[in-house]
């Protein structure tokens, strides 16, 4: 299993809101003083498993070709997941191909887990997608959504000019003299290329709202695989913003965990956007 496929398990602690705060939708300090409650603990782990169609030895020259074989990799994945199945962790996965999705459904079913998988890729990557699995005996699924992130925003439609006058107008306004003159007078106009690229990405979120059956506490978990657009960071910024907005809207005031493979580092602007909500 490639090192990049592993993410550390995170433990999340949530305080169960008192009933008075739940009814009003506000968890005030006074309400917390009136009714103390024990925090619940749950474990969330996330892995990019590297699609079964993408482990080409020519792309991973430093790896033992034997370890890149699909069956060998899957056995190692199962061994790694078994640890978290025994811990009853909530498991988030990225780059799950349809080949492995069927096998994982069987694995999770034998462990009394419920697995939600949403493929969005193409033939080259094995129609990969993201998924979330959780122990059915501990959590009840209250709601689930799998939106395509780029479709959560309204995009203006491109209209081709019709008629001679409209075509002439389009030709003049797109000519270099016109662009030079307008940029000189009003400054350079922002490029629309990265907006179009962000719109054309197919990456989807997997969102679940779970209720702890023992405490009746509700929380949400979302997972996402950020487009690998390192040459176009603006595209990744757009998807970071849109995906985070969808998670917040889905949570609707409930505590939530948003995890996945975001293809970013702590010093990147997308990391700051997700962490602080600003650039």
Image (cartoon, grey):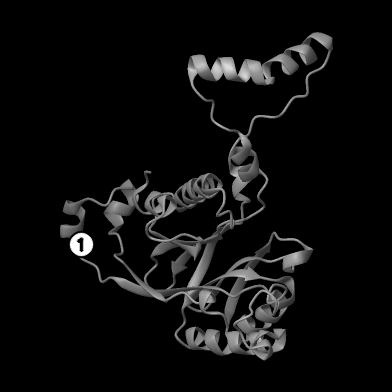
Q: Nearer the viewer, residue 209 or 203?
A: 203
**Above or below, comparing residue 142 to residue 185 in the picture:** below
The location of residue 215, given as percent across then percent down, is 37, 71
Left or right, 40 with respect to 149, comes to left
The location of residue 140, given as percent across then percent down, is 51, 69
Residue behind mark 1: 35
Left or right, 177 with respect to 53, comes to left
Q: Nearer the viewer, residue 188 or 203?
A: 188
**Above or below, comparing residue 207 to residue 235 in the picture:** below
Left or right, 144 with respect to 98, comes to left
Note whether residue 135 is visible: no
**Above or below, comparing residue 125 to residue 200 in the picture:** below
The location of residue 250, given as percent across then percent down, is 49, 51
Q: Nearer the viewer, residue 77 or 176?
A: 176
- At a point 70% along the width and 29% down the height, the residue shown is 157
Determine the image quadrant of residue 35. Answer: bottom left
The location of residue 194, given as percent across then percent down, is 59, 41
Q: Nearer the viewer, residue 194 or 219?
A: 194
């Amino acid at each position: 299993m490639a090192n990049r496929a592993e993410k550390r398990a995170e433990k999340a602690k949530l305080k169960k809101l008192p009933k008075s705060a739940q009814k009003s939708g506000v968890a005030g300090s006074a309400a917390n003083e009136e009714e103390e409650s024990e925090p619940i603990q749950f474990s969330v782990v996330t892995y990019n498993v590297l699609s079964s169609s993408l482990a080409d030895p020519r792309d991973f020259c430093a790896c033992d070709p034997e370890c890149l074989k699909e069956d060998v990799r899957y056995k190692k994945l199962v061994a790694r997941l078994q640890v978290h199945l025994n811990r009853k962790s909530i498991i988030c996965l990225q780059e799950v191909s349809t080949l492995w999705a069927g096998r994982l459904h069987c694995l999770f079913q034998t462990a009394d887990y419920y697995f939600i998988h949403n493929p969005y890729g193409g033939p080259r990557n094995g129609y990969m997608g993201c998924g979330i699995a959780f122990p059915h005996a501990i959590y009840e699924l209250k709601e689930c959504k799998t939106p395509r992130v780029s479709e959560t925003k309204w995009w203006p439609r491109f209209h081709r000019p019709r008629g001679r006058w409209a075509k002439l107008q389009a030709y003049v306004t797109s000519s270099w003299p016109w662009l030079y003159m307008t940029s000189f007078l009003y400054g350079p106009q922002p490029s629309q290329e990265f907006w179009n690229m962000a719109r054309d990405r197919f990456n989807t979120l997997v969102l679940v709202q779970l209720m702890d059956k023992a405490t009746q506490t509700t929380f949400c978990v979302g997972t996402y695989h950020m487009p690998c657009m390192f040459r176009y960071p603006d595209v990744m910024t757009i998807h970071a913003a849109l995906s985070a907005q969808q998670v917040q809207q889905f949570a609707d005031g409930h505590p939530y965990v948003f995890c996945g493979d975001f293809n970013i580092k702590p010093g990147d602007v997308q990391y700051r956007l997700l962490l602080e909500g600003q650039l």
